[in-house]
Image (cartoon, grey):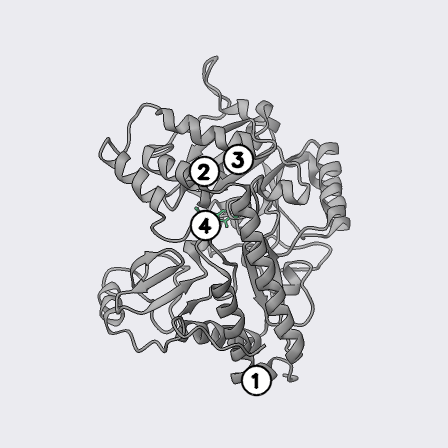
Amino acid sequence: MTRQLNAEVRHETPASTRSEEAYARALAVFPDGTSRVTIERDPIPKYMGRGEGAYLFDVDGNRFLDLNGNFTTLIHGHAFRPVVEAVYRQLASGSCFANPTQMEIELASILCERIPNVDRVRFVNTGTEAVMFAIKAARAFTGKAGIAKFEGAYHGAYDWVEVSQSASPENWGPADDPASVPLYKGMPESVLQETLVLRFNDTELLEKKLQAHGHWIAAVIIDPMPSRAGLIAPNPGFLEALHRLCRHHSVLIIADEVLNLRQGYHGASARYGLKPDLITMGKIIGGGLPIGAIGGREEVMQVFSAKSGRPLLPQGGTFSANPLSIVAGIAAMRALDKAAFARLDRLGDRLRANLTEIIGQRDAPFVVTGSGSLFRIHPMRRKPREFRDTATNPAQNAVLGTLSRFFSRHGVILPNGAAACLSTPMEETEIDTISDLFGLFLEEHAADINNIEKPE
Ligand code: PMP
């Protein structure tokens, strides 16, 4: 498959002088010159000027196809007209009130109507907050404090879910008894003790661990397709066992769909047959503005209710359900009808199939995972089944870095390592550009790629 590369997209990116100037100033005010650990800098961050549809323009005027979408948030790309108009209108009428608005009912109704098991909703400001309140809700409902999570899975910055987020072969412990690995020095020992670490798609371990520890576990939190842990699908038998065991041990299931709600009109749990008690949402439901939401079964969500006095779990938030995020979310979600999801699925299938075909033709040591509008390229031959299979050695990491830099030089932002995503303004042309670029990468970097499989 050696189609001519889309000439418009292909360009060499010169050293970015304005980005360099900005970074020099930023180094004087931020600990490492950035305000988020996730900012890619290779060797310096690209400072963005503006975004339009599927494309970003940096401060030096270079254009990039954006496969990051602010960490999968921007399902309609940048400056989506209906969102822009809704936010302008709302801004002129006030940006936040201590009182509820009619609009928040509309966004909540969209979620209740579309997402199975979401009978009631509460809005917050980020995915981290949604996960935090879902965990607290599970504790308040069950009267238990402990949390079980899957090794390597990312759920934001609440301490308990940070356990084993960055576990590595040096510290993750035996496969049949994973260690609770701290994320940072000084992480409270009590948090480590209160967090049970499981392995995705390992039914035997799940059964053993819940049998021994279910009595102190409030909830198992599961991202149906954990991005940082590999963007790997759950085995149907694994989810069946999860339901059975959680019910048996009176443990709730929290589906963290902050990222994966974008997998379908009814969300990711519906796609894989997961039936959670609580669901956390974020990213796409705010149309590009900050948001988070906790949804769930009526009975469990009643912990938030103050109807008959003090709720079992008080939840507030100065900016929770702020009208700007809400109207942006309504505009984005209304445009995401079933046809829009079907189209994203088709584009995603085409891309994953193209990449897999190119890998096969060249017998290259890569494999593609993902589903719907999400994909991830792993520098290995075997499809990973869970987080431990995704561990990479220095040669593999080097190739992933080279791949991201190569894409960037050719005007495409491909996130290094985690999930890459498509957006509704993309067409087949963009899909073919990505595939062709990957083919070109395999051709031009054959020597680097060979290093992956050389014995160390
Ligand atoms: N859960 C998951 C699955 C996520 O992917 C993220 C963000 N990447 C979060 C929680 C945290 O969301 P936020 O960054 O909005 O706090």
Q: Residue at x 30, y 25 (%)?
A: 98
Left of 316 or right of it: where is 356? right
Whole-angstrom CA distance, mark 2 to mark 4, is 12 Å
> Which dot, 1 or 2, sits closer to the camera?
2
Dot 2 crowding, Cα within 10 Å, few <14, some 14–19, many 20+: few
Ligand 1 neighbours mark 3 (CB distance < 8 Å): no
Crowd rating for badge 3 (residues with CA inside 10 Å; few <14, some 14–19, many 20+): many
- Lower position in the chain sequence, tag 1 or tag 2: 2
Q: Nearer the viewer, residue 419 or 278?
A: 419
Which residue is pictured at 37% across the width and 43% down the height? 290
Residue annotated with mark 2: 334
- Pointers 3 and 1 in contact (CB under 8 A)? no
Residue behind mark 3: 134
Give the number of the mark in front: 4 or 1. 4
- Judging by the rendered image, the residue that carries numbered circle 1 is 446
Q: Is residue 262 visible?
A: no
Q: Amino acid at mark 3?
A: Ala
Q: Quadrant of residue 64?
A: bottom left
Sequence-wise first label, 3 or 1: 3
Dot 1 surroundings within 10 Å: few (below 14), some, or many (20 or more)?
few
Q: For the point 46% across and 58% down, which residue is it?
A: 426
Earlier in the chain: of badge 4 and badge 1, it is 4
Q: CA distance from mark 2 to mark 3?
A: 25 Å
Residue 451, percent from left and from top: 59, 83
Q: Pointer 4: what residue?
A: 75
Characterize the local packing of mark 4: few (<14), some (14-19) or many (20 or more) Cα atoms within 10 angstroms. many
Residue type at mark 2 is Arg
What secondary structure is marked by label 4?
loop
Depth check, front residue: 91 or 168: 91
Residue that extends furthest to the bottom in the rendered view of this protein: 447
The vertical placement of 431 against 358, above or below, is above
